[in-house]
Amino acid sequence: MEIWFTQAERMRLLEAGAKALDDESIIPIARLFQPDGPGVWLVGELDPGNTGIAYGLADIGVGVPELGSFDLAELAMLRGALNLSVERDLAFVPRATLAELGRWATAAGRIVR
């Protein structure tokens, strides 16, 4: 969704989605989070056939983060305990590939910074 990504980032996400890279090669471009809830999503790709679907590492706060697809329109509608919407972490700097981040998240039971 345009609310979270610049046009240049959107193009990079679409290019990554078109290449169908494996998780060992995908570097997340953005971190989305619930400021008043447990949800965190690291976005690495957009589906070129349906740009509302992203691929990355998702953690909804139940101790089981996983790699997979998620609907950006659903995230845009999501509200936490204080009725705040999902935001982008502007300070996020990727440290590893989605696969490596996924392994760390699985070990910790949550996405770790």
Image (cartoon, rainbow, N blue to C red):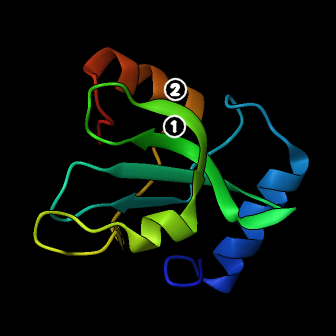
Q: Amino acid at mark 2?
A: Glu
**CB under 8 Å between discs 1 and 2:** yes
x and y, in percent, of residue 10 in the image:
69, 73
Q: Amino acid at mark 1?
A: Ala
When the figure is inspected, residue 8 is found, relative to residue 43, above or below; the finding is below
**Residue at 20%, 64% in the rendered image:** 80
x and y, in percent, of residue 29 in the image:
56, 59
x and y, in percent, of residue 91 in the image:
33, 67
x and y, in percent, of residue 12 in the image:
74, 66
Q: Where does label 2 land, which residue?
A: 100
Residue 81: which numbered mark, if any?
none
- Choose between 76 and 105: the one closer to the eye: 76
Left or right: residue 14 compared with residue 93: right
When the figure is inspected, residue 17 is found, relative to residue 79, above or below; the finding is above
Q: Where does label 1 land, which residue?
A: 96
**Residue at 26%, 38% in the rendered image:** 61
